[in-house]
Amino acid sequence: MSDNKASGRFLPLIGALILAGGIWLGYCLADGDKATDTQRKLARVFDIIDSEYVDEIDIDSVIEKSLPLMLENLDPHSVYISAADRAAANQRLDGSFSGIGIQFQQLNDTVVVVEVIQGGPSERVGLQPGDRIIWANDSTLVGSEISTDDVRSLLRGPRGSIVEVGVVRRDVPDVLKFKIVRNDVPIESIDASYMIADGIGYIKVNTFGRNTYPDFLQDLYALHREGAKSFIIDLRGNTGGFMDPAIMMVNEFLEPRQTIVATRGRNERENSIVVSDGTGNFSDVPMVVLIDEFSASSSEIFSGAIQDNDRGIIVGRRSFGKGLVQRSFELPDSSELRLTVQRYYTPSGRCIQKDFVRGDVESYESEILERYSHGENFSADSARLNTAEVFHTIGGREVYGGGGIMPDVFVPSDTAGVNKFYLELANAGLLNSFAFEYVDLNRADLMTADNTAELLEKLPSDAVLLSAFASYAKDKGVRMRYYYLNNSRRLIVRQLKALIARDVLGIQAYYEIDLTDDPAVQEAIRQINTGAAASVSAKD
C-alpha cells in the first residue's frame, strides 16, 4: 500500500510534465509531418493522459506549474514568467513603475516613509519622510501579517488611478488623509555619482536597464566638469540586465574598432561581433572597474571588454560567471519565456559562463557559497580557475575562460568588525531601525544639512552614537556583549552614520560615508594615483 501511495504522489507531476510537453510541441510543431517518432510518441502519451487519467486535470494550472520545471532542464537562466508576475519582473529594467513615489520601510509593524521621490505624486500632495501610512483605501497597513508585497500591491496601480492613504505624523494629533494620483515613478539604476578623491570620479551602477546609458553618460560629463580626470566604475552586486546599455557604456572608453563582445548561438546568421565606433569621449582617461562575486552578465560584458582591451584595471573578486544570453518570447496569455539563445564571448574569445549540470539549479546557485567555504573570497590563490582555457588580452596578458572574470588586482572580502554579535544586530534590523528613529527624532535639525559634511557635523561623537545604539539594542532585548561591541565599533558607527545620511539626504549620501573605509575603493584610488590604471598594456 505504501508503494502505491508513493507512486500516486508522483503521477500528477509526471502527468503535468508530459502534458506541458505535449502542449509545448503543439506550439513548435505546426507541421505534423515534420515530427519525429519521439515527438509523436510524446504527443500520443499526452492524448492518453488527457482522456484517461483518473483525475480531472486543470490544464491552465498544470502548465503554470510545469513550464518552470521543463526549463530548469535546459540551463539555469532559461525561465518562465507568468502573466501575473511579468510586469513586476520587468519594472526594474524598464526604468519606471506606476505608483505614489515613495521609499518605505516596515518598522515595528508599521509602514514608514523613508524618502519621498522628488517631483513624484506623493511630494505633490505633501507626504513627508517619517510619515506612518496606516491604511490605504479600505485596507489597513498596520500589523505583522502585512508583507512588503502587500504594501506594494496597495500603493502601486495603473497610471492615473487614485489611492487614498491615512497618515500619522509626529506632533500632529489627527490622522492625515491624502488622495494621491498614481503616476510613473523612475527607478534609478545609478545609486551614486560623485568625486570620491581629488581628480577621481566614482559611479555606482546597480543594474543595466533601459535608462542606464543616458543616466551614466550624464554623470560622466557632470563629473568631468567637476574636474574628474580618472574614473572608478563600481559594478559590485550588479547582476546584469540588458546587454545594449553595457555595450554603449563601454564604448565611451574605447578607441575605434576595438571588440566589445561577440555572441554566438544555434542560428549562425544571428551571430555577431560588436566593435567600438570611435564616438566615445573618455578613451584616454585612467579607469578602474570594481567587481565581486555578484557581478554578472552585462557587468561581465563591461568588465571583460575593459580587461581584454587592456583599457583599465579590474579590482575586486572573481565575478559570477554568466555568459548566456536570453531572448524574451511573449506567449499568447501575456506570460513570457526567457530562453537562452546565445553565448557571449569577451574580446579575447573567452566564454566566462561557469559550469552547470542541467536540472541541478540548486548546485549552480550555491556555487557562490562554495567559494566562501574553500576560501576564494579571502585568497586569490584559492580561486578555481580553468587554466586549460587560456586567452590573451591585446597586450599579451593571460586571462582565463569558463568561470567569471578574474580581477587584475584581487581584494579579499572585508570582514573587519564582522562577528556573531554584529551579525545578530544587523540581521535583527536594529542598525536600520535605530538610524530611522534617530532621524525621526531629530529631523527638523538634520534636514537643514545640504551635504554629508554638514550632516556629520550635526551628529554626536562616535562614542555617544555607539552608546545610544547600545542602549537602544538593549531595550529591544539584545544581551549586550561589550567586548564584541567594541570589536565592531568602527563598522557599527560607520554604518549608523551612513544609514542616517541615507534617510536624510538619499542613497548617494550612504555611499559617500560607507565607502570611506572600503578596501576595494582604496585600492582603486591607489591604482589610479600610481599610474597603473593608465598603462595596463605595459604590465606583465
Image (cartoon, grey):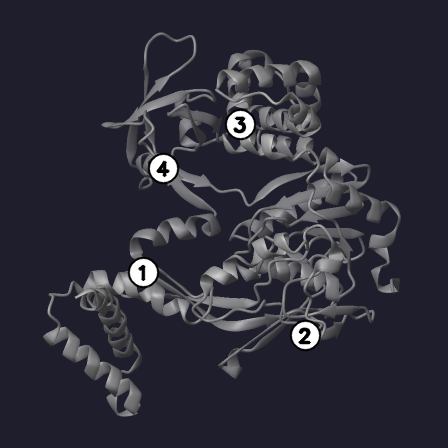
Based on the displayed image, in which of its 4 quarters is residue 439 positioned? top right
What label does residue 335 carry, if any?
1
- Circle 3 SS class: helix
The residue that appears at 38% across and 68% down in the rendered structure is 71
Where is residue 516 drawn, in percent x and y? Answer: 73, 33
Amino acid carrying label 1: it is: Ser
What label does residue 432 carry, if any?
3
Amino acid carrying label 2: it is: Gly
Where is residue 526 drawn, in percent x and y? Answer: 83, 45
N-terminal label among 4 and 1: 4
Residue 526 is left or right of residue 300, and the answer is right
Where is residue 165 drawn, in percent x and y? Answer: 31, 24
Residue 453 is left or right of residue 66, and the answer is right
**Disc 4/disc 2 C-alpha distance (Å):** 44 Å
**Is any part of residue 224 visible from this angle?**
no
Q: Where does label 2 land, which residue?
A: 349
**Disc 3/disc 2 C-alpha distance (Å):** 45 Å
Quarter of the image for the N terminus: give it: bottom left
Q: Where does label 4 land, which residue?
A: 152
N-terminal label among 4 and 2: 4
- The answer to whether marks 4 and 1 mark residues whose Cβ atoms lie closer than 8 Å is no
Of 538 and 256, the residue lying toward us: 538
N-terminal label among 3 and 2: 2
